């Protein structure tokens, strides 16, 4: 009989640091791949939607099969660590390739490139994610040691996600600026009324940042426009929001800018101003300029007579493209380094010898493990509830709370919410575990999350707009969801022992392969719900692509930027993002209560029986 060992501090650190790197990579892809291919490389939103759908369908087959492959692996280094290392290296290669799309590809080529790299990235991520989580029951004993390691890994994963959330935008800008500075494609041009026909319109914006019908056509203005960009912005090889048929479109989210109208000096960081410029070509024989300014500044603009207007535009498109390329490379190197530490320090101490099963037998074993299927369905429901809110949250801040600083408030709320999720996993869960069983903690967290959603709905209906007030429901929702991630992972690990009792085989890889897939499935379901909500209530982006001169002129005439949604749409948005998740959570807890039987007493019985089987050589 082998001697029971306890995890060392080095082993816990090595396992945790692997989770940090793993979720850094996942968050970089999950949060920015759509932005990269749509806004920077110019792939259409419809095409990207189809790619994501195909990837999710493919995952339904790939994830369980990968679990079977891992379960059948036998090497001198174990069955998990070889795949963990192979998956990490190949995933890093695909990550860098994905964020290094050749800018010379045409539209069809970029769609194909995005599809191939994204789907293969998902395959290789599964290749390392499944063995990583499958190692939990393979080198820990059931009970508090397993719970502690699961909590540690989930907390570290949250740290990895938070790092990417906080540093990516700034890191991409810094790295991209440095790399773009040495580009031979850089150009700097100055245009004025002597060589360019300018049509300039100033539009008043209200206190919430929305354009009003008040506008001034500055026909007699003396205009000077300075543009700094790369040739790729002008020759049509980068960005469908920037170039179409020779037209250059510069706006807030692809350009740093500043401007003066007479003695009114403003830049992108001062107040709720904005600017859009559409130029017919790099030589700029004609340009349409729309300038959006707050009421106080708008009232100072002379309504007649000559006015000096000076505009400075510095395109960030190439900066972002290069920034993402080299930032992904840095993250990939960190990923390989950290997972190498994990593989070097972790030993599969309790791997159980078992009869190698066929793929059909393994799928049958998974289906027959009713407790594993119960947890899988619970994970789908719990994550779907959270993802519905997270997908719609940006629209809530943008159209409901609105205001000129909605972006800052959105970022501030996300920072607080993410911090609460991490702290709850690291600190609050261990405290609760000293008092309650994991089963009771599950119910407490679901109740807390539902309470948070109801508070959020009440605050929205009563017209509260202070972002700090929304920290209250944010605390309940995100803290509870963070702890639920830990608790549900513990439950899933427990079903491995249950499956061994029932099926005489440990199917940790197959069971944990479902965890990867169901999280992806939940995100897909939530995205579908969010899309239906946006379409049903006619909630649209404020800045549609305008790629021609006539388009921008028409947009200005109709004051079409940042149009507010009506009250019925606002109410629909509030209901879907609060009542919707509440209903899903109620279904989850009722289903879980009816089906889940692995309480502490049952787990103790299973543990004793497993020891007896090993003693008898079964």
Image (cartoon, helix red, strand yellow):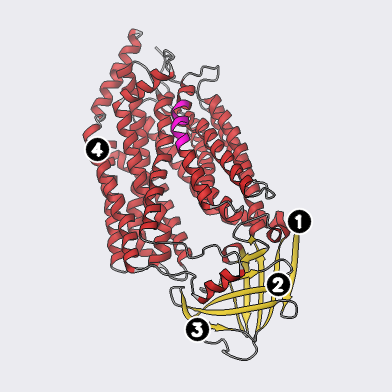
Give the percent coordinates (x, y) of residue 191: 73, 74
Specify few, some or many for label 2: CA neighbours under 10 Å numbering under 14, 14-19, or 20 or more: some
- Judged from this view, the residue extending furthest toward the right is 184
Identify which residue is drawn at 55% across, 33% down. 124
Identify which residue is drawn at 41% across, 63% down. 397
Q: Give the range drawn in magenta.
A: 57-65
Q: Circle 2 — which element?
A: strand
Q: Do the residues labelled 4 and 3 touch (CB within 8 Å)?
A: no
- Asked if residue 178 is positioned above or below residue 349 in the image, the reply reads below
Question: Can you tell which of label 1 and label 2 is closer to the viewer?
Answer: 2
Give the percent coordinates (x, y) of residue 42: 60, 54
Mark nearer the N terminus (1 vs 2): 1
Identify which residue is drawn at 66% across, 57% down. 319
- Residue identified by numbered label 3: 296
- Residue identified by numbered label 4: 591
Mark nearer the N terminus (1 vs 3): 1
Tell me, yes or no, if residue 603 can be seen here.
yes
Q: Which quadrant does the C terminus fall into?
A: top left
- Residue identified by numbered label 2: 226
Tell me, yes or no, if residue 268 can be seen here.
no
């Amino acid at each position: 009989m082998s001697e029971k060992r306890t995890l060392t501090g080095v082993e816990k650190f090595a396992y945790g640091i692997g989770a940090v790197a793993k979720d850094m990579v996942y968050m970089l892809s999950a949060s920015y791949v759509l932005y990269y291919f749509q806004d920077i490389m110019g792939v259409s939103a419809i095409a990207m939607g189809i790619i994501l759908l195909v990837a999710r369908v493919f995952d339904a087959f790939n994830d369980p099969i990968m679990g079977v492959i891992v379960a059948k692996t036998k090497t001198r280094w174990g069955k998990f660590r070889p795949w963990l290392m192979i998956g990490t290296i190949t995933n890093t290669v695909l990550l860098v390739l994905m964020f290094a799309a050749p800018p010379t590809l045409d539209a069809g080529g970029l769609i194909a490139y995005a599809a191939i790299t994204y789907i293969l990235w998902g395959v290789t991520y599964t290749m390392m994610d499944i063995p990583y989580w499958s190692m939990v029951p393979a080198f820990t004993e059931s009970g508090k040691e397993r719970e502690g390691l699961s909590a540690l890994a989930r907390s570290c994963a949250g740290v990895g996600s938070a790092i990417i959330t906080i540093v990516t935008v700034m890191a991409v800008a810094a790295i991209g600026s440095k790399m773009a500075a040495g580009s031979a494609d850089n150009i700097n041009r100055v245009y004025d009324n002597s060589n360019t026909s300018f049509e300039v319109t100033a539009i008043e914006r209200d206190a919430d940042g929305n354009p009003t019908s008040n506008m001034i056509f500055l026909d007699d203005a003396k205009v000077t426009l300075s543009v700094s960009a790369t040739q790729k912005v002008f020759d049509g090889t980068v960005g469908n929001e920037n170039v179409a048929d020779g037209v250059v479109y510069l706006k807030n989210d692809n350009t740093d800018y500043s401007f003066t109208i007479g003695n009114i000096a403003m830049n992108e960081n001062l107040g709720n101003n904005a600017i859009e410029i559409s130029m017919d070509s790099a030589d700029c024989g004609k340009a349409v300029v729309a300038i959006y300014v707050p009421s106080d500044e708008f009232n100072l603009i002379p309504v007649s007579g000559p006015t000096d207007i000076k505009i400075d535009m510095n395109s960030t498109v190439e900066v972002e493209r290069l920034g993402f390329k080299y930032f992904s490379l840095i993250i990939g190197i960190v990923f390989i380094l950290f997972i190498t530490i994990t593989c070097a320090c972790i030993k599969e101490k309790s791997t159980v010898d078992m009869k190698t099963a066929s793929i059909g037998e393994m799928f049958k074993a998974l289906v027959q493990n009713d407790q594993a299927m119960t947890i899988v369905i619970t994970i789908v429901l719990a994550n779907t509830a959270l993802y519905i809110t997270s997908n719609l949250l940006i629209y809530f801040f943008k159209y409901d709370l609105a205001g000129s600083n909605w972006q800052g408030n959105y970022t501030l709320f996300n920072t607080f919410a993410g911090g609460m999720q991490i702290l709850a996993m690291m600190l609050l869960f261990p405290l609760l575990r000293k008092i309650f069983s994991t089963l009771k903690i599950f119910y407490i967290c679901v109740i807390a999350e539902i309470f948070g959603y109801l508070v959020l709905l009440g605050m929205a209906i009563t017209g509260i707009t202070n972002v700090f007030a929304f920290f209250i429901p944010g605390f309940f929702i995100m803290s509870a969801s963070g702890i639920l991630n830990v608790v549900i992972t513990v439950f899933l690990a427990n079903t491995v022992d249950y499956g061994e009792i029932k099926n005489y085989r440990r199917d940790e890889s197959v069971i944990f392969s479902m965890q990867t897939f169901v999280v992806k499935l939940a995100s897909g379901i939530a995205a579908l719900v969010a899309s239906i909500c946006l379409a049903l209530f006619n909630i649209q982006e404020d800045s549609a692509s305008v790629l021609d001169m006539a388009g921008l002129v028409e947009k200005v005439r109709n004051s079409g930027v940042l149009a507010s949604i009506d009250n019925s749409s606002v109410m629909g948005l509030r209901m879907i993002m609060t009542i919707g998740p509440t209903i899903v959570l109620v279904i989850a807890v009722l289903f879980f209560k009816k089906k889940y039987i692995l309480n502490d007493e049952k787990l103790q019985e299973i543990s004793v029986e497993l020891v007896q089987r090993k003693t008898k050589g079964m």
